[in-house]
Image: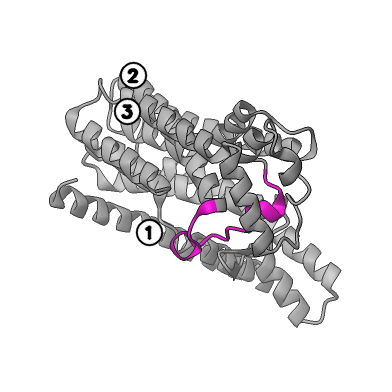
Amino acid sequence: MSEEAATVAHIDLALVDDCLERFFAVSSARAERYGRPSEELWRVLRKASMGGKRFRPRMVLTAYAGLGGSDAHAAAHVGAAYELLHTALVVHDDVIDRDWSRRGQPNVAGSFRDTGTTDGLPLPTAEHRGMSAAVIAGDLALAAAPRFIEAAGVTGERRARLLELLDEAVFASAAGEMTDVDLALGVMPTVDEVLRMERAKTSVYSFEAPLQSGAVLAGAAEPVVTALGAFGREIGIAYQIVDDLLGVFGDEGTTGKSVLGDLREGKRTMLIAHAATTDCWPEIAPYLGDPDLTEERAAELRANLVSCGARAAAESRIAEHASLARAELAGLPYDLADRLEALVTELVERVR
């Protein structure tokens, strides 16, 4: 990306932050009419939305700018819709996973649990308060996301298409989340079942819909919108496999993510689904999902995941889906294709 393009992207992402700040300022002022619990809810939800990489708005803006879009106001609002959707889904995901923290800090549920215990509530009651608050906060963020599309100032068919894409992102993510819950409870899924789940749960709202929304906002022809959806699907799947690899083999200092969490949880990733089909499985299965898994035992599990071919299989699928994503760039305008080629390299290189 040129220096000029990078500067424009930076300004546009700052505008996304401005949109969100105004939204939370107005919502916090409204909350004052309803008392302290509502004020606290909006304060904690606002905090949960801060500090992210603004990855989904970046997808919107990349497609929009790469197709010649110039209305920064409209693009920032569409990007903000996907950022608020991301906040909602993360808050709800933490409830489903019964997590009380995210990246080492109390999440929404953890914040309300902690203030409850500070106020003298017994722990089970405080935990119920925390989970309840997180459900409500996630609902508020989810309900508000379409309002940013409405505020973008787009009318007619274009507005309807943007709302349709956002709705499909929510629909797919809910389907993927429910599938994820069931996969964790049943027999070991296949590799393809895991990847279909991850695509629905994360890839649609993180890559496919934001990229297509940027194209629709720019007035792109339908073949371009379709190609961006296909590109987003393939790079999104590659991204999720990389994420799962980093969850086991990554550097915590770089990723900010524990390399014990997925193993202790027994998370059904492509790595684990592949390992379950190999002769190494009896050496892996007894320790997977152990909440007290030690670093020494985790090192043995990692070695087994390498020796059984799970890591190599994951890396091969990353390369396969990255190649399929690149194939979709052929029919796109050069400037956009160049930006997306750089994105593929950036996302795939995270695992090296």
Gap in angstroms between the C-alphas marked 2 and 1: 30 Å
Residue drawn at 64 percent across, 28 percent down: 193
Identify which residue, 94 or 15, lies in the foreground. 94
Per the rendered image, the range of residues in magenta is: 249-267
Q: Please state which amino acid type lies under the numbered disc 1.
A: Asp
Q: How busy is the neighbourhood of tag 3: few (under 14 within 10 Å), some, or many (20 plus)?
A: some
Gap in angstroms between the C-alphas marked 1 and 3: 30 Å
Residue drawn at 67 percent across, 32 percent down: 278
Q: Please state which amino acid type lies under the numbered disc 2.
A: Glu
Callout 3 touching callout 2 (CB < 8 Å): no
What residue is shown with label 3?
A: 326
Residue drawn at 34 percent across, 38 percent down: 344
Say whether residue 260 is magenta: yes
In this image, 159 relative to 34: left or right? left
Q: Nearer the viewer, mark 3 or mark 2?
A: 3
In this image, 181 relative to 27: left or right? right
Res 175 seen here: yes
Q: Which mark is residue 17?
A: 1
Task: Looking at the image, tell me whether mark 2 or mark 1 is earlier in sequence order.
Answer: 1
What residue is shown with label 2?
A: 222
